[in-house]
Image (cartoon, rainbow, N blue to C red):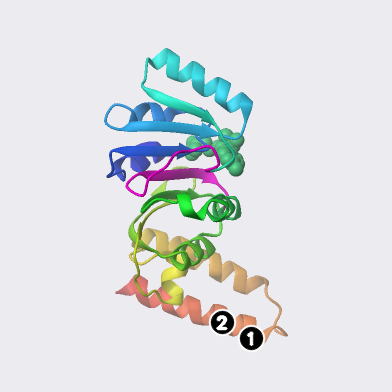
Amino acid sequence: MERLELLESLVDTKKVFDVGSDHGLLAISLSKNHEVVASDISKSSIKKMEENVSKAKANVKVVLSDGLDNLDITKKDTVIIAGMGTYTILKILKNNIDKVPNTLIIQANNNHDILRKEITKLGYYIDREETLYQNRWYTIIRFKKGYKKYSKIDYLVGPNPSKEYLNFNLGLYVKALDKIPYKYFIKRYNIKRIIKQLKKMKDM
Ligand SMILES: C[S@@+](CC[C@H](N)C(=O)[O-])C[C@H]1O[C@@H](n2cnc3c(N)ncnc32)[C@H](O)[C@@H]1O
């Protein structure tokens, strides 16, 4: 399944805001079954999006907006943010925390451990998490308002990682360990513990 299709399959509300929509392709596809608002901070993205929406004759409202600033979101809606870095995503959410709805679908480009931890701190739990390999690994997380307790390893690889995704992460930590000089023994010890846990999970 393609990344955009996977994002779309996770939408379970009537109205969706695709924030940082750029080309608008996800918004256009979503508009077949949902009420859709597509936004972006970039004027050139908005222009491109408007052209694509018009070509597809899609029913998508296009809004120029920095994050959630100009968006009229209710708690029942979904905000999708895909293809941005974790810190940008967190900034977008924290800048307008009162507008953040009960459902978020996030595909961050990096720092997924920080993303999981920080969004759960905002009062959300991981309702679904999917990983997809398409030239590189993508992680797509649907958060819902509420609370669940997570372990350190849940934050690192998600609560229900596939064996393939665990293997990929295991490789990253083994490589990282190789690069850490012996004098940083605490750092090495912590990474060895993670490697041990990932191996155990992989063999379960
Ligand atoms: C790599 S594109 C991702 C496009 C699309 N969401 C996807 O996943 O294919 C990132 C987009 O986010 C937009 N963006 C970055 N910061 C933003 C912000 N604060 N508010 C709205 N859009 C933003 C950029 O202009 C760019 O169009």
> Separation of disc 2 and disc 1 at Cα?
6 Å
Q: Which residues are magenta?
A: 68-85
Q: Residue at x 29, y 41 (%)?
A: 9
Prevailing secondary structure of the magenta residues: loop
The amino acid sitting under disc 1 is Ile
Residue 191, position in %: x, y? 56, 78
Query: The C terminus is located in which quarter?
Result: bottom left
Residue 12, position in %: x, y? 27, 45
- How many numbered marks have been drawn onto this rendered protein structure? 2
**Disc 1 target residue:** 186
Residue 47 counted in the magenta span: no
Query: The N terminus is located in which quarter?
Result: top left
The circle drawn on residue 178 is none
Q: Residue at x 55, y 59 (%)?
A: 111
Q: Secondary structure at mark 1?
A: helix
Residue 26 shows up from this direction: no
Residue 186 horizontal side relative to residue 4, left or right: right
In the rendered image, the vertical position of residue 89 relative to residue 203, given as above or below: above
